[in-house]
Image (spheres, grey):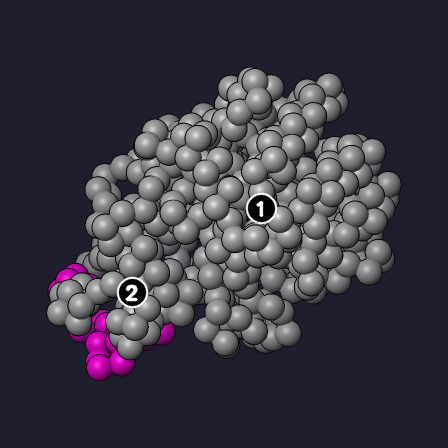
Amino acid sequence: MIAKSQLARLGLFDAKVPRYTSYPTAPHFSNDVGADMFGEWISGIQPGSSVSLYIHVPFCRRLCWFCACRTQGTQTDNPVIAYVDTLKAELDLLAARLPEGVTLSRLHWGGGTPTLLQPDLMRDLAGRILDIVPLGPKAEFSVEIDPNEIDEARLDALSEAGMNRASIGVQDFDGEIQKTIGRIQSYDVTRKAADMIRARGIHSLNADILYGLPHQTKARMTESVQKLLSLNPDRVALYGYAHVPWMAKRQQLIPSDALPTPEERLDLFETARKLFMWDNYAEIGIDHFATQEDGLTQALKAGRLKRNFQGYTDDQAEVLIGVGASSISRFPQGYAQNAPATSVHTKAIRDGQFSTSRGHLFKGQDILRSRLIEALMCDFRIDRGETLRDYDVTPSTLNEMFADADRAFPGLLRISDNGLFIPPEARPLTRMIARSFDAYDLSKAGHSSAI
């Protein structure tokens, strides 16, 4: 890796850059995309094709202080029951528009806490989804599972519905850190959840862990990662905690003076990264790790790795449909986002229309630049021949883009007749290098630190 002094000179520890799970990023969405256009895009899906479906459940029994997701707390099931009714009504609206023969390549329930649904609600929701869009061959049905909010009955319901991949949020196992971020979740509770999942024949297990949390040290990071590795997850997302209390008000409960410095954040990341690599996990992009047999690793080797709102994926579907408040859909034509507020979303659906409130219609070089950024984030390289073959760009324009990136990071990139390559020692800068290919105003709020 490049020396910290050089990384500092290049702005790694000061820069605020997107995570590039989309391009353009969500702060650049506008009201140019509405419910009518979203409906047209649904109707325009190729009959018999595969799509990906995301279901958003924005409820939690408790609100973790570190979380910046759009969620709301509830101690009763009444609002959850009403929300599932809204989801089913929204799915009915989709069914009226979807062409014949469309199947699911991926189905993902996220949130929030999808596992706060009672078993009957889970069965009801899954049944409605699969009646409308059945799972295709080799489809993946994954659910975000809170170990504090799961039991045998709910896992039975999910496994019977076809769940074949589970995702567990860990964050950190250290007790002091958990208290500081408002997320109490013991190793024993997490281990029990993993054991219950695998007891039902669900052997694909994802886990999320954070670096950059308050009071984190390399020793504590090491202990948490080793505990996580004892669960034998197939995939791990190693995300950097984004402290944005001006956006996520609950983060004001976290003492900023207990946060590691940017330089310490890099050390924490490297500590965890080395542990995963020593355990023979493949490094996937900038922040994921997977076993050698996992689909992400196979997609990386085959050059089929993709990036979307859930991070890295091996899903090849061109269409991702988001269902529920604030969910974002992606089509070949652009992005569409549902109304963020649950009340606004619910009213639209009850009135018989989609709640699409904003989005982005691809124009100009959007598709080209989206692919260039995705290639860097996934493969750390841009293939010149592939780009010229598959996209509307001239050799001179592509050369100018490469030259702009080279000027921003002199001597660090490898540019040849084959394309542009980020060598391993420069990969902490990947998001900043990707930013060189971003044509939009980067002063928009919502971007996180570069490391």
Instruction: Identify residue type, mark 2.
Output: Tyr
- Region of the chain picked out in magenta, as a range: 402-424
Tell me which label, 2 or 1, sits earlier in the chain.
1
Q: Position of residue 91 (x, y in %)?
A: 63, 35
Quadrant of residue 225 within the rendered picture: bottom right
Q: Position of residue 135 (x, y in %)?
A: 69, 54
Q: Is residue 65 left or right of residue 203?
A: left
Check if residue 296 falls in the magenta segment: no
| Quadrant (top left, top right, bottom left, bottom right) of the C terminus | bottom left
Name which residue lies at 27% across and 37% down: 444
> Toward the viewer: 178 or 74?
74
Quadrant of residue 152 within the rendered picture: top right
> Which residue in the structure is indicated by mark 2?
391
Q: Is residue 404 above or below residue 117?
A: below
Q: Secondary structure at mark 1?
A: loop
Q: Residues within 10 Å of mark 1 (few under 14, many from 20)?
A: some
> Which residue in the structure is indicated by mark 1?
99
| Quadrant (top left, top right, bottom left, bottom right) of the N terminus | bottom left
Q: Position of residue 163 (x, y in %)?
A: 74, 52
Instruction: Identify residue type, mark 1.
Output: Pro
Q: Is residue 324 left or right of residue 368?
A: right
Name which residue lies at 73% across and 19% down: 78
Check if residue 416 falls in the magenta segment: yes
Q: Is residue 64 left or right of residue 152?
A: left
Q: Secondary structure at mark 2?
A: loop
Q: Position of residue 441 (x, y in %)?
A: 21, 42
